[in-house]
Image (cartoon, rainbow, N blue to C red):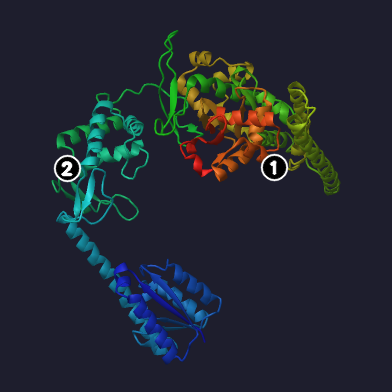
Amino acid sequence: MKAALYIRVSTHFQIDKDSLPFQRQELINYSKYVLGNDNYQIFEDAGYSAKNTDRPSYQAMMSRIRSGEFTHLIVWKIDRVSRNLLDFSSMYEELKKYNVTFISKNEQFDTSSAMGEAMLKIILVFAELERKLTAERVTSIMLSRAEKGLWNGATVPLGYKWSDEIKFPVIDENEASTVRLIYDLYLKLRSTTKIAQHLNTNHIPTKRNGTWVAKTVNDILRNPFYIGTYRYNMKDQKRRLKKEDEWIIIEDNHEGIIDKPTFKQVQRILEDNYNGNSQYQRENIHTHIFSSLVYCSKCGTRFWAGLDSPRKKDGYRPSRYVCYKNNNGCQNIISDVTLLPFILNFIANFIRLNHSTLNNLSLKSIEKTLLRGKAFVDVIGIDHFALESTFKRMATGLHDELELNSDTATESKVIQTDEMESLEKEKKKYEKALERLESLYLFSEDSMSQKDFIFKQRDLKQHLEQVNAKLAALNIPQAKDNLADLSWLDDIQYFILMDKIQNTIGIDYREILNLIDIEVLKEFISKIVEEIHVQDKKVMSLKLSNGITYKFAYKEHTQIPTREHLLYRKYEDTLLELLKTKIQVTRKDVEEAVPLGRVTIGKLINEFIERGIIVRCGASTATYYTLVENKDLPREIL
């Protein structure tokens, strides 16, 4: 015999009144002295209601009952398990299935007898009735409180704080000034988005110190709580509006922050903006081609769109896109002048690529085709995964009609496996060669020239790319699994600009804007592009609607890496760890930690100083180095 003792209380008040210890001791005593059983396991759910069975300890107990671990389930009262007739009936059927006896200590019955089982069902009916009556009483009390203007619990709105004295929110002047500012700004700007931008730019916090968005501003502008109106019972548990005759609305219930005429004027503008009424409609005649597509690579936030300054030459005014957290730790920005030539030319190159054949196709040739044109002059490459995905989709799209019989397929698979193993070995050979080349350039006494290093490195990388392309081709499934799926292009062929895109290398975006309506261009791009991630006025990644994300690598300011730059990358972690451990280090410490000559050590230290990572401190005869953030620490720490 082994008993499961189940204990539950639904409120913290009951917990504080030692209800759990009382139930626990009573059930232990029952198991020991009535059943003569010392083999038991206690399951406790503190602060959980019995309206359903979504309770952690209860679920754990039932799982162990199903495994056949227990012979008895003992509770203090039947409603400790459930007050829902359907839930309890389901549980009780499971107990019978696993031959587990149910015992209620307080009601003095167990289900090992027919009378006990009958009493159980009768009591459960009344338990559910009591639960429903209690719920009705609580609802009635809450409605009565609301009708009297009493607070029934909710998030206190911005501009108010909770008062223990009157048990209702009162005005918080620090926050109330923000609410008044929002209403004043809306009367001037008539744009929730611009208000959100203003608040973020000026570092004005939300109620929970978050970032302002247009919806948050809109909710504040529409909330009548700010004119002293208290509303209750407007929505059900699923946040759906109830019928208006069920609402409780009390005017002039508490002190408002906004006067009623201002509130009414704001509501009128909000409604007119929503309906497009020209009297109050804010000026928004400009279409932003990339709105909702551009994201910040630094913080992940979506960009908002606005108008850039007009160009002096012809008055052309492009859109600009700014991170929502601009001037709040993130100053990422980009404009149509950069985005349009990049995106249009990439789309054009992509379409031309998909019209090509697989003859002599490689990852390198795919990359070269996609990056053709002046728009990509600073881009040095596309990530390998995107190129491989493109190659596979093109190949399977052109070869999805091929079928192999079983014998041929088996033979082909063996040959393919051998070839892949050979290519993998070749790949490792070139990777090791690249590592040795870099070590030779950095550390050999008879070091090669920078020019020789660049050319040898380029040759090895080209060989490696060819091997990777062959491996990618072998990994393509030779079946009717057409992954190409370029149907996403079919429904946009009717656009006028397709002719320009397909037949022009180096698209002039200004010419396109003169030929094509901006709305058409926006729709065209939105059908192809899903996301554009931007950093430092550059497109860092581009996700197309076929699911492939292309990540771009850009040239550095110094196009050919210097030896010092490579050394910096190689020994950065070593030097930083040394500085964190010792805080202040001498040149001798660096020489002991980094296996380089004195001259090279000096260049390495200067590289770190120029990058603003470390500073030189002390006198010329007692020089030491430390991280910039530790420069004011006393020398005695060393």
Q: Nearer the viewer, residue 158 or 58?
A: 158
Residue placed under numbered mark 1 in the picture? 481
Task: Give the x, y percent position of residue 601.
Answer: 66, 32
Closer to the chain start, of discs 2 and 1, is 2
Q: Residues within 10 Å of mark 1 (few under 14, many from 20)?
A: some
Q: Is residue 308 left or right of residue 359?
A: left
Q: Number of marks in the image? A: 2
Image quarter for residue 106?
Answer: bottom left
Q: x and y percent of residue 276 in the render?
A: 30, 28
Residue occupying image coordinates x 40% and y 70%: 45
Which residue is pictured at 41% across the width and 27% down the height? 305
Q: Is residue 211 visible?
A: yes
Tell me the residue at 50%/19% (across/down).
Answer: 337
Q: Is residue 622 above or below residue 376?
A: below
SS assignment at label 2: loop
Task: Please state the horizontal and vertical placement of residue 357, each as a whole percent of the image.
Answer: 74, 27
Q: Residues within 10 Å of mark 2 (few under 14, many from 20)?
A: some
Q: Are marks 2 and 1 in contact (CB under 8 Å)?
A: no
The one nearer the camera, 102 or 410, is 102
Q: Amino acid at mark 1?
A: Asp
The mark closer to the camera, 2 or 1, is 2
The residue tagged 2 is: 256
**Residue 606 rendering spot, x and y as whole percentages:** 60, 28
Mark 2 is on which residue type?
Answer: Gly
Q: Is residue 249 above or below residue 632?
A: below
Q: CA distance from mark 2 to mark 1?
A: 65 Å
Quarter of the picture holding the C terminus: top right
